[in-house]
């Protein structure tokens, strides 16, 4: 299994365990049981069901060793025959269909007594796993009920989303401004914000990094299922920062009602008072001023307090976890792979870059900030080697020196090597 597939599988495993990284054991068990009842799309393997014990094992590995421990290892028993034949699987399916209320323990005893489980008999846990994976167990009735909630402290839960705003002036044209905002659930403080002209991972990354620097690292980040919030970069960055990344159900905007309410307030109390023809910079300056003078200092009906007061009363009671700007820059780098040419160059986005000659004909990893693809860094087994620069043939020609010729050739003083 190549490195890229192992990375994608690890990201999928993290996506499954991420929503309960910061939750107590009881909530974890309930969540894992629900996830075990549905199929999940895995790279290479397709649709699969995952048992509760497997997800718990992934959670233990991640907490002990971080993101890399979620990458699959090559199986030591690869190629061995499976205990379950097609005939046995068909028999189990028929039994489950004929006796839909039969407990798995009774099913196991029935198959064992009829000598259908081989010698020695297949273990009960193996049969249980197969029955669950195939979906032959009766499903429980749905009990989804939306309830009002509020976390206990600041940074326990952040909610992020995009809102389409007014037209703004850019260099040569008019463009729609889109607000990326992050709301702290406990205090209702807007901990991250910026208007830009796109709804991309680049716009989100800028806001997240500034929010992390100003307010610390949250325990959970709650987002929707758009391509930006479902990107590998955000998933990997949250995994490396130890943030539980939680996605709402598709098309379920009411579940993000608090930030939707914020956007309604922004439209009614901020955008409605703006005059037309602002630049993007002027819009962001006006929004920052409005937050400071209006929103953060006005009574919030949802908490019956001012957001700034609730934030200040809570922030002193919890430990705020922080990362340096250098650490944040590192975890938000985008990754690519390239094979080095014979002349020690690689091609990236239509330009040639030089790399050390030791990497000729090798596959290397390069990383760059999401908003600065020209700043390329070379990595070797996860360790940064250094920044690589654009190819400068003229500079190389000025510093070029031919290799020393063999010692058996003699030259007279004053001769120049060709």
Image: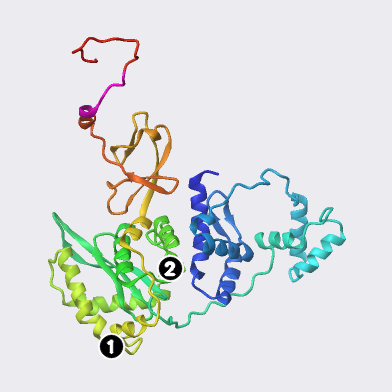
Which residue has dot 2 on it? 251
Q: Quick one: 73 or 250, which is closer to the camera?
A: 73
Residue 410 sits above or below residue 72 on the image: above
Disc assigned to residue 119: none
Q: Is residue 53 left or right of residue 185?
A: right
Residue 338, percent across and down?
39, 39
Q: Is residue 189 above or below residue 385?
A: below
Q: In the image, is residue 416 part of the stretch drawn in magenta?
A: no
The residue that appears at 38% across and 74% down in the rendered structure is: 320
Q: Nearer the viewer, residue 174 or 52?
A: 52
Task: State how the image is colored.
Answer: rainbow
- Of residues 280 and 406, the one nearer the viewer is 406
Q: Residues within 10 Å of mark 2 (few under 14, many from 20)?
A: few
Please identify the quarter of the rendering in which residue 234 is found.
bottom left
Residue extending farthest bottom: 304
Mark 2, secondary structure of its residue: loop
Tell me the residue at 51%/70% (across/down): 20
For image coordinates 29% across by 9% down, the residue present is 410
Measured as percent of width and height from the top left, residue 192 is found at 30, 70
Q: Is residue 402 magenta?
A: yes
**Which element carries disc 1, helix, strand or loop?**
loop
Q: Which SS type dominates the magenta stretch? A: loop
Circle count: 2
- Where does label 1 land, which residue? 299
First to last magenta residue range: 397-404
- Left or right position of 221 against 270: right
Dot 1 alpha-carbon crowd within 10 angstroms: few under 14, some 14 to 19, many 20 or more = some
Give me the C-alpha separation between circle 2 and circle 1.
31 Å
Quarter that holds the C terminus: top left
Q: Indicate the quadrant containing the N terminus: top left, top right, bottom left or bottom right.
A: top right
Q: Is residue 113 left or right of residue 196?
A: right
């Amino acid at each position: 299994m190549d490195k890229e597939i192992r990375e994608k599988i690890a990201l999928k495993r993290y996506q499954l365990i991420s929503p309960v990284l910061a939750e107590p054991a009881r909530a974890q068990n309930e969540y894992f049981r629900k996830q075990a009842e549905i199929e999940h799309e895995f790279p290479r393997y397709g649709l699969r069901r995952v048992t509760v014990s497997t997800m718990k094992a992934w959670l233990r590995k991640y907490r002990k060793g971080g993101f890399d421990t979620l990458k699959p290892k090559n199986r030591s028993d690869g190629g061995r025959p499976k205990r379950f034949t097609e005939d046995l699987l068909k028999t189990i399916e028929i039994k489950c269909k004929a006796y839909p209320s039969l407990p798995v323990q009774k099913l196991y005893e029935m198959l064992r007594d009829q000598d259908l489980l081989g010698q020695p008999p297949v273990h009960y846990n193996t049969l249980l796993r197969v029955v669950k994976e195939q979906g032959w167990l009766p499903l429980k009735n749905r009990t989804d009920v939306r309830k009002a909630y509020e976390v206990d402290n600041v940074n326990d839960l952040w909610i992020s989303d995009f809102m389409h705003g007014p037209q703004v002036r850019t260099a040569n044209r008019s463009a729609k401004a889109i607000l990326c905002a992050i709301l702290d659930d406990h205090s209702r403080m807007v901990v991250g914000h910026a208007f830009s002209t796109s709804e991309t991972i680049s716009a989100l990354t800028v806001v997240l990094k500034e929010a992390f620097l100003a307010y610390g690292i949250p325990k959970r980040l709650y987002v929707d299922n758009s391509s930006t919030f479902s990107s590998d970069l955000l998933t990997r960055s949250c995994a490396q920062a130890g943030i539980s990344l939680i996605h709402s159900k598709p098309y379920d905007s009411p579940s993000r009602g608090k930030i939707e309410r914020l956007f309604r307030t922004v439209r009614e109390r901020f955008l409605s008072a703006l005059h037309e023809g602002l630049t993007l910079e002027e819009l962001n300056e006006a929004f920052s001023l409005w937050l400071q003078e209006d929103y953060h200092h006005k009574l919030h009906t949802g908490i019956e307090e001012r957001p700034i007061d609730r934030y200040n009363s809570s922030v002193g009671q919890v430990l705020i976890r922080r990362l340096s700007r250098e650490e944040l820059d590192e975890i938000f780098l985008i990754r690519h792979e390239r094979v080095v040419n014979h002349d020690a160059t690689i091609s990236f986005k239509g330009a040639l870059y030089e790399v050390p000659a030791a990497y000729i004909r090798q596959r290397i990893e390069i990383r760059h900030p999401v908003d600065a693809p020209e700043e390329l860094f070379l990595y070797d087994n996860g360790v940064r080697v250094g920044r690589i620069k654009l190819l400068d043939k003229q500079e190389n020609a000025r510093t070029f020196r031919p290799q020393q010729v063999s010692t058996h050739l003699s030259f007279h003083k004053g001769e120049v090597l060709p």
